[in-house]
Amino acid sequence: MAQNNDKYTYRVTWSEDDNEYVGLCAEFPSLSWLADTPEKALKGVRKLVADILLDMDINGEPIPEPIACKHYSGKFMVRVPPDVYRKLALQAAESGVSLNRIASSKLSQ
């Protein structure tokens, strides 16, 4: 049976190009639903996701895990130019904290 679509990440925004509200789902970035009210846009995209999930389930396709249900390690690698690395390393040393602490602090701002 298909996964419950209530756990997915939905967003409604205004589309100036379409002159309507657009409902979106982060886990299904290619899907959208246009409507004249935010409520209808949300309802429409949720129904669309439910239909897609049912179709994926019937066809044995892998169903995306909701972002809210994923477990994150807290680690990711990012490459920065050498001068940025040097600047961060200097800030960390002057502050008496690790480079990870400085980077984490800047990312959470």
Image (cartoon, helix red, strand yellow):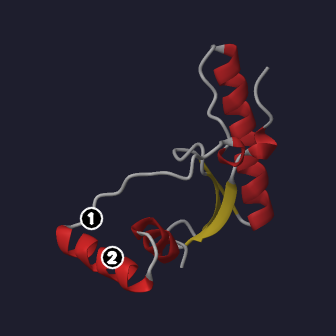
Question: At which x and y percent is residue 23?
Answer: 66, 57
Report helix, strand or loop for mark 1.
loop
Report helix, strand or loop for mark 2.
helix
- Which residue in the rendered view is the most extreme toward the bottom? 94
Q: 10 Å neighbourhood of mark 2: few (<14), some, or many (≥20)?
A: some
Count of labels in the image: 2
Q: 10 Å neighbourhood of mark 1: few (<14), some, or many (≥20)?
A: few
* Residue nearest the observer in this picture, 38 or 29: 29
Dot 1 corresponds to which residue?
80
Question: At which x and y percent is residue 59?
Answer: 63, 14
Query: Do the numbered discs 2 and 1 sit on residues whose CB atoms are within 8 Å?
Result: yes
Q: Is the residue 58 above or below the residue 26 in the image? A: above
Label 2 to label 1: alpha-carbon separation = 10 Å
Question: At which x and y percent is residue 18?
Answer: 54, 65
* Residue nearest the observer in this picture, 40 or 63: 63
Left or right, residue 54 beside residue 20: right
Question: At which x and y percent is residue 72?
Answer: 60, 46
Of the 4 image quadrants, the one containing the N terminus is top right
Q: Which mark is residue 61?
A: none
Identify the residue at image location x=75%, y=56%.
42
Query: Of the residues shown, which amino acid type is indicated by label 1?
Result: Val
Question: For residue 86, what is the image quadrant?
Answer: bottom left
Q: Residue 88 carries which label?
A: 2
Q: Earlier in the sequence, mark 2 or mark 1?
A: 1
Identify the residue at image location x=72%, y=32%.
51
Question: Can you tell which of label 2 and label 1 is closer to the viewer?
Answer: 2
Identify the residue at image location x=75%, y=66%.
38
Question: For residue 65, what is the image quadrant?
Answer: top right
Identify the residue at image location x=54%, y=79%.
109
